Image (tube, rainbow, N blue to C red):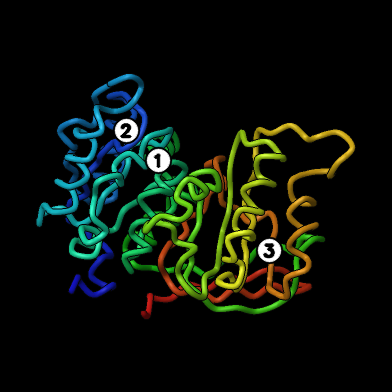
Amino acid sequence: MGLPVSAQFLHEGDTIAIISPSSATDTATIGGGIRTLERWGFHTVVGRHALKDYRGFAGTIEERRADLLWALTEPSVKAIMCSRGGDGAVHLLCGLSPKVFKRYPKLLIGFSDITALLSAEASAGNIGIHGSMCHAINTYEGNDTVSQALRRMMMGDLPVYRIPHHSLDQSGKAKGILVGGNMSVLHGLAGSVYDPLNLPDIILFLEDTGEGMTKVDRMLHNIEVRGLMSHVKGIIIGQFTNYKRVPNTFPDMYYMFHEYLRKYPIPVCYDFPVGHAHLRNFPMLVGSVVILEVGGEGTTLTFSSPSY
């Protein structure tokens, strides 16, 4: 059995490991993350291979996996922050037993490509934070609203998010395990033991950047054709950025989602502040139980500790 969920949250003085599971990064990015985390009262250690560059990745698959395993198994490390996203986190899951995540629950922090690792944690019954990494907390020096929300969540101070009403919202109330993140990364996990859509009774949140409307359309229908919409009790549509609208189709990405989701009698929230723009990327506690309420006055998302 792993640690109780409450033990995964942090206290001042705890040690956070910084690793690079995906694309190569640089000293300034990791150094800036260290300064912010230490200003917040944490100690930091850096993975042995975190600054390597191998064909655009932060080291070979074996090196990056070794850093992840070190951070998971080292008793002094209480949480793991990823330096950046990019590509390649899924490499680490190939040949890695899901039992590792069950045995060594650690609060893992990141987003974008790190969705792969957050999904592995959620599938193991653990929590993780879909939130800002070294680059963002360095850029804003940890003082902005989003960074401060991340700091509070890391320490177990869970928020209640209240979001203005969007014209496409679907009213309703649902309770479930919060899973999701970057839609294209989630799509890459389809059918695997790390696919969080296999969990029953989920609240699914989605965001992406640089993915065209036709690709998002295919990914959305992949969920449906696999018969997994029955697992989804509510949906949160975050920020979809840097894409071109397809002429003579939908006005934007949200209208496309609405065209297909309106047939499901579940709450759906649009324009939630989670995605690739830091100041619109509030932290989400993946793997936690949440209550999603969508109505004419707006959306409320309430977090609680997981209960499996």
Few, some or many C-alpha atoms within 10 Å of disc 1 (few <14, some 14-19, many ≥20)? many
- Amino acid carrying mark 2 in the image: Gly
- Amino acid carrying mark 1 in the image: Ile
Q: Which residue is mark 1?
A: 137
Rendered-image quadrant of the N terminus? bottom left
Q: Position of residue 132 (x, y in %)?
A: 43, 45
N-term mark: 2 or 1: 2
From mark 2 to mark 1, how far is it between C-alphas? 8 Å
Q: Is residue 136 above or below residue 57?
A: below
| Residue pictured at 60% horizontal, 78% vertical | 174
Nearer to us of marks 3 and 1 is 3
| Residue pictured at 37% horizontal, 35% vertical | 88
**Looking at this view, is 131 or 145 the one in front?**
131
- Residue 269: which numbered mark, if any? 3
| Residue pictured at 33% horizontal, 19% vertical | 55
- Residue 5: which numbered mark, if any? none
N-term mark: 3 or 2: 2
